[in-house]
Image: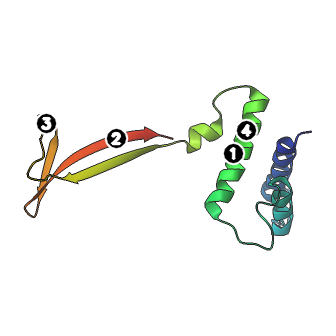
Amino acid sequence: MEPNAQFVQKWADLLRKIWNKKSFKGHVSPHELMQIVTTYSNNKFKINEQSDSINFLTWVLNSLNDYLIKKTKTKSTIIQKSFQGKLLVETFTVIKENTIIGPNDKIYEENGVKFTYVAKEQNF
């Protein structure tokens, strides 16, 4: 069994323990989770060291996504559909005296200063 599959199996077992309705104890050791993560992340995330939460979440989601892509042999997974997004980048540029303004440029003025406005949408 490849390392990614082992991580996914351990992750699934852990989630089953947490959400088992027949279990009277809703307790799963955080140490157990961190042992799994430390092992399968090649010590990138360790028990005794604090790491960036965005890096951790990215690693978990990428590991689960890679496994699902290999398992289902599809290009798109539920993880991609749920977490992939769009970013709207808005740029305001100060218009100087020598600036040539096009007929389609959007112009805004605030406190006597004129700006051009450009909005671009990027997919991630």
First in sequence: mark 3 or mark 1? 1
Residue under pointer 2? 120
Label 3 vs label 1: CA separation?
44 Å
Q: Amino acid at mark 4?
A: Asp
Disc number at residue 102?
Answer: 3
Residue 15 shown left or right of residue 53 in the figure: right
Q: Which residue was labeled with disc 1?
A: 62
Q: Compare marks 2 and 3 and give the one earlier in the sequence.
A: 3
106 or 94, which lies in front?
94
Circle 3: is it few (<14), some (14-19), or many (20+) Cα within 10 Å?
few
Label 4 secondary element: helix
Name which of mark 4 and mark 2 comes first in the sequence: 4
Callout 2 amino acid: Lys
Horizontal relation, residue 30 to residue 93: left or right = right
Q: CA distance from mark 1 to mark 4?
A: 6 Å
Q: CA distance from mark 3 to mark 4?
A: 46 Å
Label 3's element?
loop
Residue under the point 71% across and 71% down:
50
Which badge, 1 or 2, is on the more N-terminal residue? 1
Specify the farthest residue to the top. 73
Is residue 62 visible in this depiction of the protein? Answer: yes
Return the residue found at the far bottom.
48
Q: Which residue is mark 4?
A: 66
- Residue placed at 74% from the left, 45% from the top? 63
Residue 21 seen in render: no
Image coordinates of residue 66 in percent, x first then y, are 73, 38
Q: CA distance from mark 2 to mark 3?
A: 18 Å
Kind of residue at disc 3: Gly
Crowd class of label 4 (few under 14; some 14 to 19; many from 20; radius 10 Å):
some
